[in-house]
Image: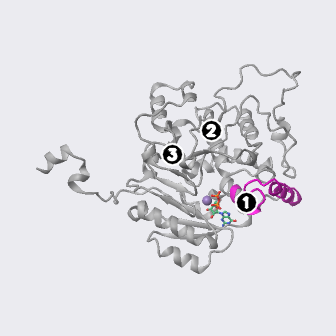
Amino acid sequence: SIRKISEKHDKVFVSGCLEPQVNAPRANAAFVVLARNQELEGVIQSVKSIERHFNRWFHYPYVFLNDGDFNSTFKETVLNYTSAPVEWGKIGPELWDFPDWADPAVTKEGIAKQGDAAIMYGGMESYHHMCRFYSGSFYKHELLQKYEWYWRLEPEIKYFCDITYDPFIHMIREKKTYGFTIAVKELKETVPNIFRYASAYKRLNNLTSKGLWEMFLEKPEPSPTPLPESDPKYKKPLPEEILNSEPGKGALPDIDPEAMEGEVYNMCHFWSNFEIANLNWLRSKEYNDFFEMMDRSGGFWTERWGDAPIHSLAAGALLGVKDIHYFRDFGYRHTTIQHCPANAPHRQLPRIPFLEKTTLDEKLRKEEDDYWAHPDPPKENGVGCRCR
Ligand code: GDP
Ligand code: MN
């Protein structure tokens, strides 16, 4: 009988591949796609891929955003590739441009210097706007106000595997806040001072780690005996006057990037071109205080801070390990970096040393194992880092 066969074999052997359940309630969620008209080809590739592997069953809406206007070719072409609702949003200067208090001479000079120093995208003003927009503005856009969750979609990405369940619903059920599928190391020269400010935020707000902060530390623990002030190697922490001051012209104070108050950033971050997260977290006072302090430092133009390390360090300061979900089952590629589930089997996982040092209970420890440990990434792409 069928029953007997199905006990002996995988279900698909008996029944074939099943279409996923589509009549379950949906989450209050949307895809968010920031793009320009000239990226139409890449956008189509991404929409085709996510539709084929997920959204043809789930029909989540799309919100397309642009600091310019989408032309009719762009809009009409995109609509050929999905039957889900699509909204088109223009980003006003209040969400896109640098803040009023930033001196244009300072921003221009900062960006030009990074161009001269051949920092990746450093000399490109629009890229700085994009990073700042994804760090502290996109969730303020009017079209996103009605949503509680978003899934970021970029041009020129690929999903390899069918996603046959609703990740939003699963995140809600498991009380998750932020989901990623790739973690990599940031280019140091784009963020020389980012960690000083992030760790100062954590210190000034008396935030204690919920186990995630350690993911971003070069060494799992701060050096046990701080150097005495008389030591020539002693570096002053960021003065509180600077951190709490009213915004100035937006120039970073002259500080030594090596001075890290005992903790050193290991450059790890969740790669934010894919992310599924709760918008209410980004809208929270804590997150926006964090963004504001980071913004006031001027690092979005005097350096080239990406939204990926911003989201990651905010998560490290504000969230715990159990708030994060690693979508190990999503096959995903952006440019040269990919995550392939076949390379991240659920079993035979090495432990991550820093997690051994946390004081979490056994249940949480087990969750960490499930969510965090992952094996060596495929070598040929130099993919990923293990964040340890
Ligand atoms: P990379 O992935 O870091 O190489 O950067 P991308 O060029 O892919 O940019 C990241 C995202 O921001 C993509 O969704 C781009 O379409 C979008 N983007 C970047 N710059 C601009 C811009 O000036 N205007 C608009 N509307 N979108 C932008
Ligand atoms: Mn990209």
| Kind of residue indicated by mark 1 | His
> In the picture provided, is 269 more to the left or to the right than 114?
left
Image quarter for ligand 1: bottom right
- In the image, residue 126 lies at what x, y percent? 73, 63
Name the residue type under label 3. Pro
Is mark 2 in CB contact (under 8 Å) with mark 1? no
Badge 2: few (under 14), some or many (20 or more) residues near its Cα, within 10 Å? many
300 shown above or below 268: below
Query: Which amino acid, mark 2?
Result: Gly
> Does the segment drawn in magenta span residue 104?
yes
Per the model, the C-alpha gap separating discs 2 and 3 is: 26 Å
Q: Is mark 1 within 8 Å of ligand 1?
A: yes
Which of 360 and 338 lies nearest the eye of the viewer?
338
Question: How far apart are labels 2 and 1 at the CA level?
Answer: 24 Å
Residues marked 2 and 3 touching at CB (< 8 Å):
no
Of residues 370 and 333, which is closer to you in this image? 333
User: Helix, strand or loop at disc 3?
Assistant: loop
Residue under numbered circle 1: 129
Q: Position of residue 132 (x, y in %)?
A: 71, 55
Main SS of residues in magenta:
helix
Q: Quadrant of residue 111?
A: bottom right
Labels 1 and 3 touching (C-beta < 8 A): no
Instruction: First in sequence, mark 2 or 1: give its number.
Output: 1
Image-based side of 95 in relation to 4, left or right: right
Which disc, if any, is residue 316? 2
